Amino acid sequence: MKLVTIVSSCNFLEMYNFMLFGYYAPSIGRTFFPTASEFASLMLALATFGAGFLMRPVGAIVLGSYMDRHGRRSGLLLALGMMALGTLTITCMPGYQTAGVVAPLAILFACLLQGLSAGAGVGGVSVYLSEIATAGKLGFYVSWQSASQQVAVVLAALVGIAITFSLSPRTVADWGWRIPFMVGCLSIPALFVMQKTLSETPEFLQRLHRPPGTAEVLRSLAENWRLVGLGMLMATMTTVSFYMITAYTRTYGHEVLHLSLRDSFLVTLCIGLSNFVLLPLMGGLSDRIGRRPQLISCALLALVTGYPALLWMASSPSFGRLLAVELWLSVVYAGYNGAMIVFLIEVMPAKVRASAFSLAYSLATAVFGGFTPAICTWLIHTTGNRAAPGLWLAAAAVCGLLASVLLGRHALAAPALPRIPPMRSAPGVEIHSR
């Protein structure tokens, strides 16, 4: 499990920074995008962060093809280094009053760099875990990719609670918001540790054919456009449900249901813990009962129960109701995601596994999942219905259900991932890609 822990930690920084930027977007807007209107400053900050989502498909192709050509280890280290540089830039960059127009441009650069990195982060970690998994435990191993992200959700919520109790709102707005990003910079020394301890996967080292260049990767992706498109639909259910129950919970609980900020943070914390426990269990369950039945069942549950659950919660908002509904959606999300990640890996062509998976997942995040908080806010504003986010979840569930049915044929025809015994090295010698 040592390798699983090391590799899964690559996803930690990505999600940690996403949660932080969402939490402190108003402070970031005032610091780097000052205008006469606080709303305009906030929207500029969110638009800058949104630009990072648009870079994810680019990162999936560029870094994903790098992983398929040069190895999972090299690609993950490169992606983590780019993410760390983006975090350091946000942490240390002086505000607009000091640096002028350089400040917002530097934050835009940091978000684009992080988006490029995140585009291949999930795919690279998931493929690495699938290639070191032991027989019969593929779902369990791969589920730790998603479980590691929940640690970031929990830590971001804990840091948010600590800052809320320790600092005044004015202090947080002035400079306190930088403290959580400083914590994220601890990934920089972690990068050097990973460089020494992380080995290449035996399956990649024993592969006879590797794409010689990005052009061949792009050709293969084009030939498998249907798989990538259906994979995007399947991942839509995961990304929408995840961002709804984590990133959007603070805003929904505080701004829409008018609960206290502390209650909203506590619910987010509980959801992160719930997801962390459930994801490996659900991944292991998919090893026993099969991916497709689990995917179809969870998509149906989201479709049938999502909107009624939110309607019940919105009819009489309380901490207990918000927690109960979010925990139920956590069960549905974990059940679906625990089977979905490994299912997509299994149906993707081996020679472009990292790039094809990363592209499908990144497209789902860029087009649907990442904009879930904004779409939910717009739906509530337009309809006047506080349960309207349940309709967005239902639409995502339809996408997941449709893709699960259509991709089932490919899963039956695709060859199983080979289980290669771990390669042993002589004492003091590590196995790395060349």
Image: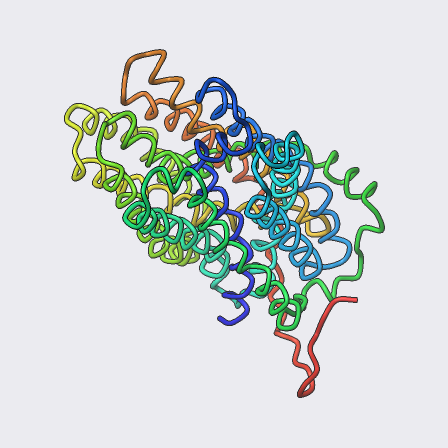
Q: Quick one: 411 or 268, which is closer to the camera?
A: 268
* In the image: residue 14, left or right of residue 82: left
* Residue at the (65%, 42%) spot, across then down: 113
* Residue 215: quarter of image: top right
In the rendered image, residue 121, in percent from the top left (x then y), is placed at: 60, 49
Q: Is residue 136 above or below residue 46?
A: below
In the rendered image, residue 205, in percent from the top left (x then y), is placed at: 73, 66
In the rendered image, residue 345, in percent from the top left (x then y), is placed at: 58, 49
Residue that extends furthest to the bottom in the rendered view of this protein: 427
In the rendered image, residue 416, in percent from the top left (x then y), is placed at: 59, 56
* Residue at the (79%, 61%) spot, across then down: 208
Is residue 258 visible in the rendered structure shown here?
yes
User: Which of the colour schemes (rainbow, by chain, secondary structure, one colour) is used?
Assistant: rainbow
Q: Is residue 65 above or below residue 7?
A: above
Q: Quarter of the image containing the C terminus?
A: bottom right
* Residue at the (48%, 46%) spot, across then down: 178
Q: Is residue 227 above or below residue 334?
A: above
* Residue 220: quarter of image: top right
Q: Quick one: 304 or 15, which is closer to the camera?
A: 15
* Residue at the (60%, 66%) spot, across then down: 419
Q: Quick one: 84 or 120, which is closer to the camera?
A: 84
* In the image: residue 58, left or right of residue 390: right
Residue that extends furthest to the front in the rendered view of this protein: 98
